[in-house]
Amino acid sequence: MFFHYKGLQFEAKPDKPDPVLAKHLQELLGGAVGEMTVAMQYLFQGWNCRVPGKYKDLILDTATEELAHVEMIATMIARLLEGAPEDAYVEAAKDPMTAAILGGTNPQHKIVTGLGPALADSAGEAWSGKYIIASGNLFADFSLNAAVEMQGRLQATRVFNMTDDPGVREMLKFNIARDTMHQNQWLAACEELKSDGLETLPSPSAFPESDQNNEYAYTLFNFSEGSQSSEGRWASGPTPDGKGTFNYVDNPQPMAPEPVLPPAPPQYYGTPSTGGGIVQKVKDILT
Amino acid sequence: MFFHYKGLQFEAKPDKPDPVLAKHLQELLGGAVGEMTVAMQYLFQGWNCRVPGKYKDLILDTATEELAHVEMIATMIARLLEGAPEDAYVEAAKDPMTAAILGGTNPQHKIVTGLGPALADSAGEAWSGKYIIASGNLFADFSLNAAVEMQGRLQATRVFNMTDDPGVREMLKFNIARDTMHQNQWLAACEELKSDGLETLPSPSAFPESDQNNEYAYTLFNFSEGSQSSEGRWASGPTPDGKGTFNYVDNPQPMAPEPVLPPAPPQYYGTPSTGGGIVQKVKDILT
Amino acid sequence: MFFHYKGLQFEAKPDKPDPVLAKHLQELLGGAVGEMTVAMQYLFQGWNCRVPGKYKDLILDTATEELAHVEMIATMIARLLEGAPEDAYVEAAKDPMTAAILGGTNPQHKIVTGLGPALADSAGEAWSGKYIIASGNLFADFSLNAAVEMQGRLQATRVFNMTDDPGVREMLKFNIARDTMHQNQWLAACEELKSDGLETLPSPSAFPESDQNNEYAYTLFNFSEGSQSSEGRWASGPTPDGKGTFNYVDNPQPMAPEPVLPPAPPQYYGTPSTGGGIVQKVKDILT
Amino acid sequence: MFFHYKGLQFEAKPDKPDPVLAKHLQELLGGAVGEMTVAMQYLFQGWNCRVPGKYKDLILDTATEELAHVEMIATMIARLLEGAPEDAYVEAAKDPMTAAILGGTNPQHKIVTGLGPALADSAGEAWSGKYIIASGNLFADFSLNAAVEMQGRLQATRVFNMTDDPGVREMLKFNIARDTMHQNQWLAACEELKSDGLETLPSPSAFPESDQNNEYAYTLFNFSEGSQSSEGRWASGPTPDGKGTFNYVDNPQPMAPEPVLPPAPPQYYGTPSTGGGIVQKVKDILT
Amino acid sequence: MFFHYKGLQFEAKPDKPDPVLAKHLQELLGGAVGEMTVAMQYLFQGWNCRVPGKYKDLILDTATEELAHVEMIATMIARLLEGAPEDAYVEAAKDPMTAAILGGTNPQHKIVTGLGPALADSAGEAWSGKYIIASGNLFADFSLNAAVEMQGRLQATRVFNMTDDPGVREMLKFNIARDTMHQNQWLAACEELKSDGLETLPSPSAFPESDQNNEYAYTLFNFSEGSQSSEGRWASGPTPDGKGTFNYVDNPQPMAPEPVLPPAPPQYYGTPSTGGGIVQKVKDILT
Amino acid sequence: MFFHYKGLQFEAKPDKPDPVLAKHLQELLGGAVGEMTVAMQYLFQGWNCRVPGKYKDLILDTATEELAHVEMIATMIARLLEGAPEDAYVEAAKDPMTAAILGGTNPQHKIVTGLGPALADSAGEAWSGKYIIASGNLFADFSLNAAVEMQGRLQATRVFNMTDDPGVREMLKFNIARDTMHQNQWLAACEELKSDGLETLPSPSAFPESDQNNEYAYTLFNFSEGSQSSEGRWASGPTPDGKGTFNYVDNPQPMAPEPVLPPAPPQYYGTPSTGGGIVQKVKDILT
């Protein structure tokens, strides 16, 4: 159950309106790795968490914070959309420059939301529940969380460089700092899972090694021209999971022959291998 | 440019048809973390790679292998769909058991693909280009790749436990082994980026620390009831990026007041704060 | 069965081309509450209507009219796209102003439809069958129809204020008037359902009151800081359905303890609650 | 900013597992009018609300409660998925009945979430940000909210009739009661907007009547065979908005001639109206 | 503008209910090549047609008929859903066979539409505006229409073989016949375009041959192991467009060197080619 | 199994950066008929091909080439995005022209991919697995392939006319030539299927004529005002499949009465046909 405070976790107030920046900021709200994604990913991981205690609490702490971040970005977008000249569109018909600027904004910010945020990314594509993963395996999920926070921080830093509005930058400095924390915390949580003896690499670690084809578990196949890939530490030496040694296959060969599929049964009307008589055959079978 | 070999990288032949399992296997082909996702994610990372040499070669080696995995799962699905009794549906009208089994299969395997694989997941949702990320930052991307391989391996092990068909299990043992390798290789590649001095934590590492609000970069806010989250190593001690010390805020407070948004300009017909006269006001402005 | 007249229900002819406006008008055609949505929502409500007579006839009258509105907006968009300077793009490479205007248009209007309308919204997102609802309960559906007509009229008035093209405004004046009618007619139809004794509030009205937890059927829970919400008529006095009295709970408490979920069976490789022995346990069970 | 309580708003505990019901319950979580939709619709309406005070507080009270409902349904689904026989799939290969039951469950509940809820509907389609509307016009939005609560209550009552599990029914009785409250509160809020003089019918009410084509604002066009639609109160008498009188047009005629579109400029390679010479003409223009 | 007749174009009445078949029939209604797709594809082609006369009339004749087909399938689905035992779900909890059959039906047919059709395919995925193409080039569009009618007829014949319900089969016999007509008519229309001198192969035919790299316009590159593809008539002899001669390249080589991309500007935080100093460099540039 | 060459099939190098053109080129990469669609459509047709030999080899030759085309367009987009002024966004805040140009580019090219290609179309909508069809019937699939190549070539010629960059045009001349070849080859393959006696018109040709309602298999129904459609060769004379004669029905009539659907069972809470007593009736049945 949740409670909502009226205040924002951190200030979200631009120095001046900027509808083009509002369009760009939608990526941090409703993009594939935006605040909505991490909020929902963590909530569903929390609600799907079957390990009571510190792990579940950590997940729900962070999930709840991310809801506040969705709120901050949403508020910032609403404020960036304010203050458009009241008759901008009518003027735009006469003034190509105004037309051009308006053309670069998100039409739905005017027509659909009336100067409010949308639950969509910077290209206007709606946020999707497919962006989140909550697998029930904490090591796999925490590793993904750390990676998503990296992508999210990367995007925030790019938007940071697209504006010199002090108010927007102040908020982004906070968001970028939180992304730093969250990268660190999820990686620390992976370490904790290891030291608690619950999970380790490769994930899932409970799958019996005997059911894995170990001959191919530490091999780099060179499927692209050139062998520069043999020069990295992924091509020789011990593997990060501590269970094997990397090896390199320079010229990989198919291990199975070309698959030859038999014809489909006639009622599917796939193309037969040989001509003639198919109509009669279908008739015979189906009638 | 690519070349196609007729043989499969590894055998993909079930011992007997099983259309329900074919439906489940679609997750490994066209799910959010399935073979199609990793194939395309790595291809686009390779084509977007601005660091020539070993990293780019590693990415394209793996991308090209993943195309072969898409082919293997696709072939396995086609074979699992074969051999349905030729008049199963007509019989099903009479035999509730046959009806029930058919009801549990993917209708599109019959109607749309005629016993072939679909580019969709196990719930029938089409694969989406939104599943892939290629950011141009190798550390962020490799971390994500490792995490996606964990989720993919997890799903493959779950499907492994859903069948005792020796042919399907043989293929999955190979796929699971390759997922082990790919987890290891992407983590090793992150290490290589660090030792080459190119990238490190937090990602992106080139963003100036002075532009991050450091006060909040290593803080865990306790936004969920209870303080069990203070017990993990993410709440105190040095952070994994080696740049800070975790701290814990037990009772976080809003740092900004409630946002109060002014009315939108009248031409958007948002609800005004006070009643009366709005029609006239709009008339005055717009006419 | 349908018949198509060549004439339009109402004129749809702009005074001059305007490709940026064409992009905006797409919202009224293929947006979530655009003409396509109401046309299809009403058609499916009509085809799913199990009450013969005046209600079904009303639904199909309106559905069929909305198809004519889709046609009108589609025609208007095609005409707004005409007349672009023939070598605009090549010129644009030299003239930044032309480039800027072209950049604000919908690329698919040129590349995909060749100056025709798309079945998409103003952000270019394709129309989706998920936008429509036809539940079989007429009160619930008519209430939704009235609400969607309000959103649709709101969007049309916003676009009206984005242009001073007399031809476009003339068409929109007609569309806005029809949205007025449709709001009125669906609300009148809800009244008719009540006076015919078929449905009433709360919807669905046939659900036995004894199966509803009446203790919580008229309570406003104050889950957000401050108690300004207690000041409206939704917090006390009789409820619109005439069946209860609003009451206000200022400080709502959880009514159930924290859910503690047991571990998942081992074959799903969820994280166990306690470390050790899991590989062996899985082996024991599965082999 | 939000705070999360560990307890649930109301108990969400089934008497026994039922994975088929878990699949059906997904509709109430992630369907087009499920709990996720109302939670996000209200949050975005709150964050886009430009009228401080009781209205905004009401919106955010309800939004925050709906998050708790998402949590309840998510928890219920997780519990309904528990307790599957540990080797069900392997057994299913031998026992067609087990196979049939498993075939009727959601494959992603096993493969993707490992017995947890998905952010998707009962057909497995992911939740979409397109489901929500927050227009900035409170009357239009509150009307929509009431209508969505009707659809949501309707779906909950249908699921209620699909099970006799006492635990599930107990939770649904609570959800259905809350849907009753929310229908009432949003309709009461529409009344409050009227009595506060802020908004009324038709929505948006601030659009100048002089810009609406009033000749067609209260007319029912009979576009479907038969004239049963003339028998309802939507065809004559005063309109609900109190501004007009319904009238009925039995045999509506097109008001504009067939649109005849001129050829597109040659660089789009649309089909010309007359044959011959087009290649040369394009060459002349473009080179 | 349209008019709706109450009668169906052709009878759509099953002999008995069959909810599993109803789920399968959704493919013919809302699948990628179902009736909704052809109805909308032809409507938009008609509304985008810039050649007045026989072609536009043909398109709109067919578009309008397809709306009647959507209506027929929708009606058939509604009727197939009728007559389920009234307490089927509650019984299903006790009777695994009933549970299994119900599990194979579309949950949304019960929960969302209340025994009505959905605008979705047989896997429950919503119909999308992306399925339609209306390019403005009639030859390209008519060729696509013929091809889509082939896929549609193929799917209808497959569903035909899934049932022996005489009523369903009677309707499908009609639909399959209409698909035969539509294949023929669109191919005849392509011939007509040729004989009218408006369009021909390759499409678009107005593109100047001098702007095509003719050296590669009739070459088959052998990119897959083996050279069986050289045995068909696509590898030698005159081409169908009458403008060239097929030739075969057995061992195609890259014609351009490996692309080496320079580093992105520092404000995007892509991985640099060489380590060191990047933070300082960014600082220098951006401050 | 695949192998990747480092060189490109053909050069993909613009003379100068152009981020607006990069946005447009996305249509040829990730649009509904772009290179990704044909690559995946052909791969899945190949993997679903149950006719070994020349047909399967042709499909996989072409599929593999299309992967190289995805690579070429992806590379071109990456290069078109290079060279933006390093502080463009910050400058844009001061210079409206720069702002306008930036507004016309794809925001995700900066924020998400860091100057790399996206797997999306020119409107930013992600590529979808729904775009591909692989039915198992080669005639239906080859016809569709030819049609998709026509649409793809049409789009490429339109983009060709949007730029005069010599490098971009050089690549497009190659792509357009390949589209010419692919149109020809798929049409030739349809001829080959006929001459091999495997398939012919109407597709699928193995469906027994006796199961088709032949009375309506060659009839054009005039459902749109006017009878210009009677003037084409689709209205009289022999049909292209050689099996019938076109005929024209000027005034088509419904062949079935209005469908009257009975009420749904009460547990779905559809609106009943007559008022009164429904609550009691539901109670009686369900309790």
Image (cartoon, coloured by chain):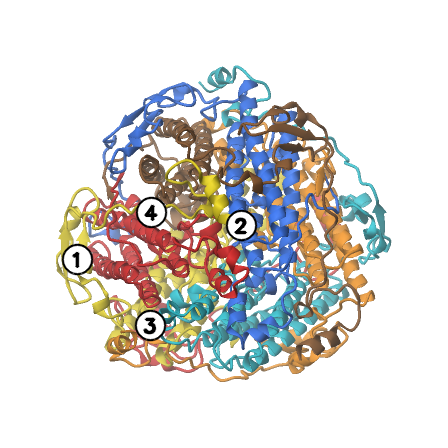
Chain colours: A orange, B cyan, C brown, D blue, E red, F yellow
Question: Badge 4: how crowded within 10 Å, few (<14), some, or many (20+)?
Answer: some
How far apart marks 3 and 4 lie (CA) works out to: 32 Å
Mark 3 or mark 1: which is in front?
3
Q: Are marks 2 and 3 on the same chain?
A: no
Residue denoted by label 4: F261
In the picture, the disc for residue E195 is 1
Q: For the residues labelled 3 and 1, say whether their Cβ atoms are less than 8 Å apart.
A: no
Q: Is residue B191 visible?
A: yes
Image position of A16 (left or right of F61): right
Residue at left offset 12%, top offset 57%: F236
Q: Position of residue F81 (x, y in %)?
A: 55, 52
For the residue carrying disc 1, how many other residues have a C-alpha within 10 Å: few (<14), some (14-19), or many (20+)? Answer: few
Left or right for D67, reference B280: right
Query: Taking C95 as reference, is B205 above or below it?
Result: below
Amino acid type indicated by mark 4: Leu
Q: What residue did someone put label 2 on?
A: D159
User: In the rendered image, is residue D124 in sight?
Assistant: no
Q: Residue furthest right?
A: B237
Amino acid under disc 2? Val
Which residue is under mark 3? A267
* Residues flagged by tags 4 and 2 on a common chain: no
Question: Label 2 marks which chain's residue?
Answer: D
Left or right placement of residue E196 versus residue C212 in this view: left
Mark 2 neighbour density, 10 Å: few (under 14) some (14–19) many (20 or more): many
| Amino acid type indicated by mark 3 | Gln
Q: Chain of mark 3?
A: A
Asked which secondary structure carries label 2, the reply is helix
Q: Position of residue F50 (x, y in %)?
A: 38, 77
